[in-house]
Amino acid sequence: MAETGASPAAGTGRAAAEETVTAGTGEALVTETGGAPAAGTLHGLGVSPGRAAGRVCRMADPPRLPAPRPVADTARETALALRALEEVAAELSARAGRAPGSEAGAILEAQSFMAADPGLRETVEENVAAGMDAGHAVDAACGHHRRALLEAGGHFAERAADLDDIRNRAVAAVLGLPVPGVPDPGHPFVLVAGDLAPADTVNLDPATVLALVTEKGGPTSHTAILARSRGLPAVVACRGAPEIGDGTWVSVDGTAGEVVTGLAEEAAEEILRRAAAERRRLAASTGPGRTADGRAVELLLNIGSAADLGAGAQAEGVGLFRTEFLFLGRADAPGFEEQVAAYEAVLRASPGGKVVVRTLDAGTDKPLPFLDLPEEPNPALGVRGLRVGRVRQDVLDVQLDAIAEAARASGVQPWVMAPMVTTAGEAADFAARARARGVTRVGAMIEVPAAALRAGRLLRELDFLSIGTNDLSQYAFAADRQHGELADLLDPWQAGLLRLVAECGRAGRAAGKPVGVCGEAAADPLLATVLVGLGVTSLSMSAPSLAPVRERLARTSLAACETGARIALDADDPAAAREAVAGMTAAGAARR
Amino acid sequence: MPERTVTIASRTGLHARPAKLFVQAAQAQGVPVRIRVGDGKPAPATSMLAVLALGAVHGTEVTLAAEGPGAEAALDSLAALLARDLDAEEASGG
């Protein structure tokens, strides 16, 4: 509560907001004091389908330290820094009190203790004595203790994120800036932020966050992936986001990528009611994936562990089991036994029995300490995915051994694929290693354009392909996945990307072997019909996307999918492609 | 200097709630208590960050040390705390 209450005005801390937000005292009651909220429509990229509406809570960005300033009065400076830490400790303790008995409450309480830590205070005092101003003293002290936690490894290293949060909060307090981090206003809200970091999203309570709107980010950014996994409508790369006033009412259309601002409260509630009705309608579509004329299209789940296989997902299996979640945040590689247990749990729990296991996708872009890889100037183009085997073949071999053992123990034979396969030679080598361990279905992720262009040749070595559209876009369009300014290039409706998918689909048909899509493109219901038209035989996505995709496929014939695919391949740009395919399928539905 | 060596009984190790309870108890003692793992550098038991940085998991042996009046009693009470599974107590209490 303190966060929003403490913000004196809408869009605090953002100069751009001041000229546009006319009704900006942050509370809906501005309408009573004259001046209606500024109404308008903002556009961005819709990355997680669905509609929602609610009150806006803005997330303040982490504070940036200004240049160091000379300190005249050391005692005053020390007091300023220590008071900031005390405020943070009190706020965290109050938050912990609102979640009594829960895991989150325990962690917040421990975090409150960190903020009040005598060791931290001592380091701050030493830093000020050495000439630092309050902000830099807090920043450096947190950095010092952060390194100690990282050295302790395991669960202890994970607490470094708590210290980062303390640092951001305390520095903001010193500088008189709004409290950073995800707000906790005590009512459901639409979260508006510059961008979301993984650490922010840990604390996101899906019961109170209605939708996400970010100024930065692209279709494959962390925000987008989180939103889809939670079923939250989301719009990213929304340039107008800084203008949205704190406490105003907005609606978010995560399919069209639109944010309507300046709504009346009643209008927002009506939108929420309609969205709930739409969800009920979609939930009524069940069963395996089929086109209107009965062509089977397997609908599968993307998961990171057995915990993601919740009830009610109605998938026909797992199309992408990302094994790296077992490896992330670890100082040492997980051992053979631990891996067997994790893989066996997924194999036993999977609906329908089909599980596609992807071997470790790490590297210098997703660093794992135990791999001990040297830093690279361009990690996305460096040693990652299957390429890690060039320097650490043992890691891949142990993983394949563990997958084979989990298959024996569970009686479920997994499909196994490698990430970042680029050449036929790499595909042959991986296939040989997997088959030597008894794996019967070996495949490759298609993420590198060179591999897509040689899909037919790769399929002579392999049993299946799975297209990772997120990375394939990044590499085909020379555009960083995390680069908000380039998000339009990463739009999965780009004809250049679809041409590479078409090449894979053609090769799969010719070889009579399955070709799936496990990138987030598969989760867009309209684009899913285009992918099927391009020859894709399975679609893998996070659980909330299954029902909308199933429902859309069920009312589109294979012939219509193929017509849509031709239209999309020839379209001038993604917006034109979307519009033309949507118009075509709407006309088809009307004729029926 | 009086010392006690004790094995961490809490399942999550000296982390989260167990760490908080231990630091709270240490702060309530009349004497400064230091904690270390093996021959490692002793850390003040009143510092959450220093205690976490020990990286003491379930089964780790830690040594507590204190000096002066009340040292023996303080060590007994803190060692007894670490020898209990504080996570299990939380589960049954909640």
Image: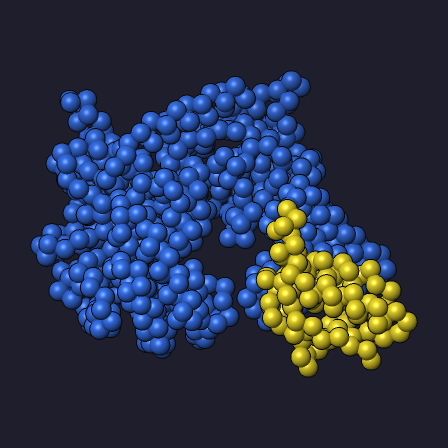
Chain colours: A blue, B yellow
Whole-percent x, y for residue A362 in the image: 39, 65
- Residue drawn at the location 31% of the way across and 71% of the way down: A401
Task: Point out the residue furthest to the left here.
Answer: A510
- Residue drawn at the location 21% of the way across and 30% of the way down: A555
- Residue drawn at the location 29% of the way across and 67% of the way down: A404
Q: Looking at the picture, does residue B31 appear above or below residue A259?
A: below
- Determine if residue A91 is in view: yes
Question: How many marks are shown on the rendered structure?
Answer: 0
Q: Nearer the viewer, residue B75 or A158?
A: B75
Whole-percent x, y for residue A182 in the image: 58, 44
Does residue A384 appear to the left or right of A158 in the view shown? left
Task: Point out the residue furthest to the front here.
Answer: B92
Q: Looking at the picture, does residue A374 appear above or below residue A167?
A: below
Does residue A476 appear to the left or right of A363 in the view shown? left
Does residue A4 appear to the left or right of A312 in the view shown? right
The image quarter containing residue A374 is bottom left
Q: Nearer the viewer, residue A292 or A20?
A: A292
The image quarter containing residue A463 is bottom left
- Residue drawn at the location 70% of the way across and 58% of the way down: B20
Task: Point out the residue furthest to the bottom here.
Answer: B39
- Determine if residue A579 is in view: no
Whole-percent x, y for residue A135 in the image: 72, 57
Does residue A6 appear to the left or right of A565 in the view shown? right
Q: Nearer the viewer, residue A398 or A277?
A: A398
- Tell me the quarter of the image containing the N terminus of chain A: top right
- Tell me the quarter of the image containing the C terminus of chain A: top left
Whole-percent x, y for residue B65 in the image: 78, 75
